[in-house]
Amino acid sequence: MQNVLIVDADEHSIHVLQRLEQFNTYQIIGIANRTKQENTNLHVQQSDVPYGIDPEEFLSNKVQLVLDFSGITPITYTDSYPHIKVITQPVSQLIVQLLEKVVSEVQAYQTDIVTYQSIFNSVEEGMVGIDEKGTINLFNDSASKMLKIPVGKVLGNPILSIIPSSGLQNVLQSGITELDIELQLTNGLDIISSRYPLMMPDGRIAGAFAVFKDVTGVIRTAEEITDLKRVKTMLEAIIHSSDDAISVVDSDGLGILVNPAYTRLTGLTEKEVIGQPATVDISSGESIHMKVLETKRPVRGVTMQIGENNRDVIVNVAPIIVDQQVKGSVGVIHDITEMRSLMKQLDHAKAMIRELESTYTFDDIIGTNEDLLIAVEQAKIAAASDIPIMLRGEPGSGKELFAHAIHTGSRRHEGDFIRVSCASLTVDSIEMALIHSTSKAKAISGTLFLDEITELKLDVQMRLLEYLRSGSIMAAGLPRQIGMRIIASSAASLERAFHEGILSEDLYYLLTRISIRIPPLRTRTEDIPLMTDVLLAMLNQEFGMTIHTVTSKAMQKLQAQHWPGNVRELENVLSRAMILSESGTHELDEEDITRALSSRSEQSNESALPEERTLASLMEDHEKLLLETSLKEHNGQKVVTADRLGISLRSLYYKLEKYKLI
């Protein structure tokens, strides 16, 4: 390091020359000013560098270089100090100018380095570089965070000791760039790395560097997305394979998903529903989807009409809630038309069973009601005789069951039990029914059950009266003795019938010698739990289901009904509740019963009949008109017509035959 004396320099030159000390090559030991007053160069005087007027004051300080800026009098004292080099004004000024430029460039370079370091450490990607010996000379903050190693402990160390799997040594040797390489670090971090050789202008490889990014979160997200896609595919497969129609809407009530069953039911294609308001498929009624989105509560058992064909359906809709936010709703739609078809088949099967079976006994009459027990005791007494019996009671109260039990409990139980509809009987047909037992080679005659005796034509009544009086009928011009037991039934007033001339007075008195009145279900609601158990067991066998009981609230609802259709209506409601219940359930709850009763009520209302009245209670002069109107409304479908009128299929056929409508 050389000691420098500055002579007669201005303040700017001195300030620039002082920057020489940054290079650790020169040290300014003094500043002399021969041309200015002592009060000048105040800034220089206040510095740590010694200041004076005579240069010779500093020669004892081992000055090795003098920079003279005066340009007036050459310095002659160098003769005494030959080791001192003197640089005069022109050269000194040039040195200042060159030094000023160098200092400026150094400052700019330092600024660039700070900027580059700031950028280098602010990027999210990790960066690591090595020199040609494989030593780490570049390591940014992101790399430090990922590897959990401080920068100071990395720089200057071999790359193989810090990141053995970096691959930078291979790039350093091959000079080939490697892009998007998946790698797992020793700390379990998953990264994607790209590696580049550092090529000098002469083609020499001076090192290599790598840029890498943490993709652990990306991989986890990708796996979650894959799992979600798998679940979504599975759910879509389940939804599309369901026989129930399903529709899903978003939080704005716009369709986002329907299954093939929905398309079959509504006649609407997926394109006609997706992205459209939830009301697009509704023929009448409000949108249950919108109601659920508004209330955030599920809605079940709503009957409505949907689709181009106005199909009658029952709709269950539930909200889709994610993080306590309603994101949409899903609706499951049951086609009542198919259920009614099943009910039609069921009614037909029941009718066939009633026609063919005659094995009911008094044990099949369920109940502990006092009036019912009195009727049973009367029937048991009557079974022991051959006297004609009249069974009186409302439609569906069990008159045919009593007739079966009387037959089974009598000495005629091995004979045939023949039930005939009085409305369809002619003289010839009643004679055939009466001689039925004698045509079979049986020692004991059977029982003839005449259902709804008030609908028997007068000429047929006369022939029946003849048999009851003589025990024989005329066949092929000759009297023929027969022994058929007669049991008749009526839901209408017999007294009114014979006063109006509808029923022969003589026949009335002959048939009512033993008259048994069967109480309606509404007067013996205490029997409903027992009857429900029996009916459920029977319906389970028919439907292949395992519903064995009803909840207490459901039973209370059943016992609160008026039951104009009596036991037959109870059976109908229970069968509907079973069909409409959730799959796999083992008991009927209040909601199941309510839905079945609602379905029954709607059908009754649509029939244009007053609530809780059956066809048998209407005036006779209106019956034919009502039957014709209802048949026309339902395109001649008798099961649907009977359902809407609130009567059994059997009663409907009686009326149609009576008025010659078939």
Image (tube, helix red, strand yellow):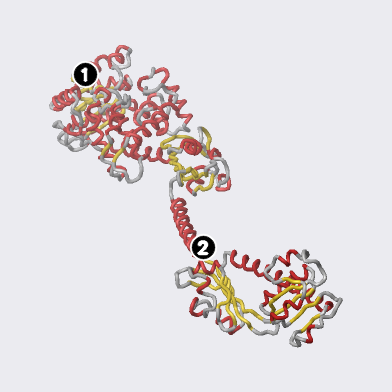
Viewer-proximal residue among 604 and 295:
295
Give amino acid for label 1: Thr
Q: Give the number of the disc on residue 86.
A: none
Query: Which-is-in-front pick, marks 1 and 2?
Result: 2
Residue type pointed to by label 2: Val
Give the residue at mark 1.
512
For residue 482, say whether it is visible: no
Residue 589 in picture, x, y percent from top left: 32, 36
User: For the point 22% across and 26% down, which residue is it?
Assistant: 487
Residue 23 image offset from top left, x and y in percent: 68, 77
Q: Position of residue 161 (x, y in %)?
A: 48, 79
Does residue 547 appear to the left or right of 36 in the view shown?
Answer: left
Crowd tier of the residue under label 1, counting other residues whose Cα lies within 10 Å: few below 14, some 14–19, many 20 or above: some
Q: For residue 96, what is the image quadrant?
A: bottom right
Instruction: Please tell me whether mark 1 sits on a helix, a strand or a loop.
Output: loop
Number of residues whose C-alpha sits closer than 10 Å to that of mark 2, classed few (under 14), some (14–19) or many (20 or more) = few
Q: Is 379 placed above or below 52 here?
A: above
* Viewport quadrant of the N terminus: bottom right
